[in-house]
Amino acid sequence: MSANIIALLFLFLSTVLAQDAFIGVNIGTDLSDMPHPTQVVALLKAQHIRHVRLYDADRGLLLSLANTGIQVTISIPNDQILGIGQSNSTAARWVSQNVVAHYPATNITAICVGSEVLSTIPNAAPILVNALKFIQSALVASNLDGKIKVSTPLSTSVILDSFPPSQAFFNHSLNPVLVPLLKFLQSTNSYLMLNIYPYYDYMNSNGVIPLDYALFQPLSANKEAVDSNTLLHYTNVFDAMLDAAYFAMADLNFTNIPIMVTESGWPSKGDAKEPDATLENANTYNSNLIKHILNNTGTPKHPGIGVSTYIYELYNEDTKDGATSEKNWGLFDANGKPVYILRLTESGSVLSNDTTNQTYCTARDGADKRMVQAALDWACGPGKVDCSPLLQGEPCYEPDNVFAHATYAFNTYYQNTGKAPESCDFNGVAEITTTDPSHGNCTSSTGGLNGTFPNATAPSMNSMSSDSTSSMFSQSSSLLLMVGILTWSIIFLPTARFM
């Protein structure tokens, strides 16, 4: 085989084997009204979120995530590190209960052994690598070591002299832990996991770091940061910290360990001491971060090599201790209502946030009238659509026919479930359109990232009987409509949270 053919073969294989970077979301649970696991998963599906990280191995969430295809990173909480790091059998038991019991139905892809252990619980540092090795051994015993990665998220505070990135190095006092850790990651083809927070870098810089540089905003050439040793130009804090980590690993002679960012984000609200924790800045940072990652931009040191990143976080955690900002990193509130609308034009389908992509769901012309009526009954019942605007005298009563009423209900359901394509089917009597069916004062409610997500798992719109001929809602009788709504309320609402 000629050298040219071999080169082409390797190029082909590298292209095939290369994986695009992904955007995931952390799921914290410090909420006074934490949604039921089925609600959490319904929100993830509606927002096309395919990667999540849990801070523990919550059984309810793992069961609800089963058979969804969503890739899940689970965690061993810091308070369990000492026990697992000192006992192989404890580690094996943890893997049996929290991994083997759920895999492969729940697509667990990684395990975080603690979080920021070296900087938050230094007394556990000596046994951290043991904990990773014991968990890895348990995975090997279960034949899962090739499917599930093991690592531990580090704070960027363990990297010193981080700018210029080429001068960065790990805190030498941690080398007795970091060197064995990096050897472990290298031998298991795992990731160096980092939590990167440009918000805190900006806040602690005493004005040295410009806000636009922290937010991924476009910079003029003369405002870009330049590494005087490599002459590489940096346009944002995030990339500079990534390259600092690459250089810090190289300082310890590790040059082939990929990085995964396990946390990054920006708070949407702060107290008087945090004036830049605003909705606009949070929107700007996370929107730009998502586009940066999904475009596989890479860093100046490693251009084109995307770094998968988990946004901190899915929900605002209102019961967290600390400053106001600690409670306001979420993309959604507890009801699934977006804190702000991310600007994601041309950034793929992750999160249903691209408000330029306006689609609607309508009753299909020519569909069987009885099937449309049955679908309308379902939408206003188990589908939990508020159909009160269809009552006589209300803005959506006219035109008083089943197709118009069904279009209102179908579109409301479609919008409330994040415009997922499968939510506009209704056993074949609905279709997606770009024509807004609103008329007069009749406008379907919008959900997903533009409104409140249903406060329960959205049931399957195709679970209704396809040959149903019963009609709870007469197309011309507002009295029957009201009776239907009240009936469904009595039957479903008391248990809606646990469906």
Image: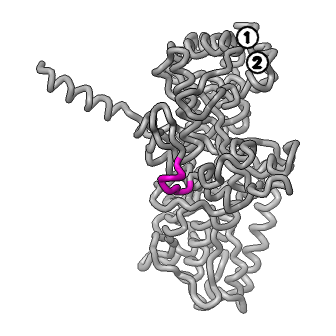
Tell me residue 9's x, y (percent): 22, 27
Tell me residue 219's x, y (percent): 52, 55
- What stretch of residues is rendered in magenta? 217-224
Tell me residue 465's x, y (percent): 56, 61
**Are there few (<14), some (14-19), or many (20+) residues within 10 Å of tag 2?**
many
Chief secondary structure of the magenta portion: loop
- Asked whether residue 221 is drawn in magenta, I would say yes
Tell me residue 295's x, y (percent): 44, 48
Q: Amino acid at mark 1?
A: Ile
Q: Nearer the viewer, residue 484 or 395?
A: 395
Give the residue at x 86% y 47%. 323
Q: Is residue 356 above or below residue 43?
A: below
Residue 127 badge: 1
- Determine which quarter of the picture holds residue 170: top right
Whole-angstrom CA distance, mark 1 to mark 2, is 8 Å
Are the two marked residues, 1 and 2, in contact with CB atoms closer than 8 angstroms? yes
**Are there few (<14), some (14-19), or many (20+) residues within 10 Å of tag 1?**
some
Viewed as shown, does residue 15 lie left or right of 25? left
Q: Is residue 391 above or below residue 176?
A: below
- Determine which quarter of the picture holds residue 65: top right
Q: Earlier in the sequence, mark 1 or mark 2?
A: 2
Q: What secondary structure is found at the residue carrying circle 2?
A: helix
Give the residue at x 57% y 77%. 406
- Determine which quarter of the picture holds residue 1: top left
Give the residue at x 50% y 48%. 292
Q: Is residue 191 visible?
A: yes
Q: What secondary structure is found at the residue carrying circle 1?
A: helix
Q: Which residue is mark 2?
A: 81
